[in-house]
Image: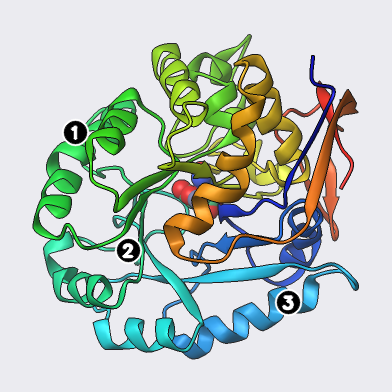
Amino acid sequence: MTDSLTIRRPDDWHLHFRDDAVMKGVVPFTARQFARAIVMPNLSPPVTSVEGCAAYRDRIRAAVPQGVDFTPLMTAYLTDDVEGDELARGFAEGVFTAAKLYPAHATTGSAHGVTDIARIMPALEKMASVGMPLLIHGEVTDSHVDIFDREAVFIERTLTGLVRNLPELKIVFEHITTADAAAFVDVSGPNVAATITPQHLHINRNAMFTGGIRPHAYCLPVAKREVHRLALRKAATSGSTKYFLGTDSAPHAQSAKESACGCAGIFNAPYALESYVTVFDEEGALDRFEAFASENGPRFYGLPLNEGTITLERGETTVPDTVDANGTTIVPFHAGEILGWVYRG
Ligand code: NCD
Ligand code: ZN
């Protein structure tokens, strides 16, 4: 039995840092475990301009604890009015690493998102021509479509056509939650990849209703049936280079989750690696964890692999009921559980 796993330093290819006081509180959790992270732009107002994004990046850098080596990789928020030239300028200047497509009203902070992908085709063509990746929240927003079907319907209605019409565009299908999504990624060409969160590997939709309503198991895309969770575990641990680590860590105050209309989002940053490695261990795939956590992402993005290593050891990590993020109380993923791995840094 492997009791200790040393891997190249990993990256988180999808998360939410927010801004201001909470951001200062959550950045250190990610900087402790990851060398880089792709930072989502769904602030209020969203991050759309190159200058606004550079300023946000400066605020994040200032929140990284002294002596910790951590690089935020920034993203542009696509709106109906996005200019391809502005995206390309931000990409060329090294401010935008990628751009994020939120279908309007799909999730937290998506009110300014794209109403119809046809409207942004010129910008997507520009992105394809400069090699800038498109990150997609893949859910339709049509209220007539059952919430558990919105990802699968997005593949049918939007993603299949986009990949066919613009095969040169690098696409990351973010936080996939279904067997349908994994099947789509598997059969698509090398320009289509996906991130998978820890929660979608650990829980199915029953977790939201165990003995009562459980707001801390609610995120978007919502967790699906067990058959989908098993397909995601298979995809993540398959050895395919198309899948990589992206936590979708999404901090919301405890009070905003435990409410008559609780926010979508799971805060998993503090114990992300312990959570993921548990899955790879259970699947007998510890030898494939390094590629998922530290290699497939940078290779897809065309970025260098990190130098240095981190070590995870078998042991007990007790996840607290709450964590303090610079004055905001947040309930972390796995709250109150004991995980069977310890992060040694
Ligand atoms: C995210 C958030 O809170 O910003 N919420 C979530 O449930 N994942 C938005 C998102 O990624 O959908
Ligand atoms: Zn997200």
- Of residue 158 and residue 32, the one placed in the foreground of this image is 32
Up the image or down, 248 lies above or below 91; here it is above
Q: CA distance from mark 2 to mark 3?
A: 26 Å
Residue 48 image offset from top left, x and y in percent: 42, 78
Q: Mark 2 belongs to which amino acid? A: Gly
**Residue 209 shown left or right of residue 132 in the figure:** right
* Residue 113: mark: 2
Which residue appears at 70% of the width and 73% of the height?
60
Report the number of discs.
3
- Of residue 75 and residue 144, the one placed in the foreground of this image is 75
Which residue appears at 72% of the width and 39% of the height?
273
- Of residue 267 and residue 238, the one placed in the foreground of this image is 238
**Residue 77 shown left or right of residue 29 in the figure:** left
* Residue 144: mark: 1
Residue 319, by quadrant, is: top right
State the SS at label 2.
loop
